[in-house]
Image (cartoon, helix red, strand yellow):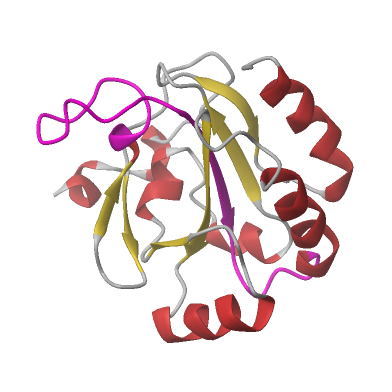
Amino acid sequence: MIMALLSPASLVAVSEGSEAPSVMFRTLENEMVFSRDFVGEPRILKPEEPRVNLVLIFFRTSDSQLNDWMPLLLSELQRLNKSKFRAFLVAVDENPDEIRSFQNNHRLAVPVLLDKFGAASELFGMADISAFNKAPALVLIDKTGNVLYFNSHFSSMDISDLLMKTASLY
């Protein structure tokens, strides 16, 4: 139903300080994960879930720069305080079996979620999923549900900017 209501002209990229859209992903086990389980107003089904800051890294395995940014970024994300932050890699429009293989081959410590048809990335204003073949997009959402950092063409050169933003949340 949401897909029918969205048109490319109505999509606007989120900006720092704006409220993050409420999105849903699937795990590799086909379980649903909702952003509101971590940030912003809790869902009715999980009213007691603690609020944390959320890091979403939208990517595709065909990203030509993947081996440059991923090891450095994941290393830094593992250092974040787990009681204050949750980080997820979000595979955009990827085959779940290929992502399982990718996850095993890269020994990823950060959980991978699926944005099967690019619907979540569209809600963040990133309608052109082919852009993820060149660079990931990264969103840092504070526990109140506001976008603290947004970069639609993230690279290893941007890690220091992200770390400054995360430091402000301690």
Q: Give whichever of 83, 66 is nearer the camera.
A: 83
Please state if 50 lies on the left or on the right of 141 as rendered.
left
**Image x and y of residue 10, in percent:** 37, 33
Q: Is residue 165 above or below residue 111?
A: above
- 54 within the magenta span: yes
Q: Which stretch appears magenta? A: 36-65
Position of the C terminus, as image quadrant, is: top right
Q: Residue at x 48, y 49 (%)?
A: 127
Quadrant in the picture for residue 108? bottom right
Q: Give whichever of 115, 97 is nearer the camera.
A: 97
Please state if 48 lies on the left or on the right of 108 as rendered.
left
**Image x and y of residue 94, in percent:** 47, 74
Quadrant in the picture for residue 117? bottom left
Q: Is residue 156 above or below residue 60?
A: above
Q: Give whichever of 65, 45 is nearer the camera.
A: 45
Please state if 92 lies on the left or on the right of 151 as rendered.
left
**Image x and y of residue 109, in percent:** 60, 62
Q: Residue at x 72, y 56 (%)?
A: 135
**Image x and y of residue 14, in percent:** 51, 28
Q: Residue at x 54, y 38 (%)?
A: 82
Please state if 101 lies on the left or on the right of 66 as rendered.
left
Magenta span: helix, strand or loop, mainly?
loop
Residue reaching furthest right? Answer: 157
Q: Count how many numbered circles sit on residues in the image.
A: 0
Q: Is residue 61 above or below residue 46?
A: below
Q: Residue at x 81, y 49 (%)?
A: 155
- 117 within the magenta span: no
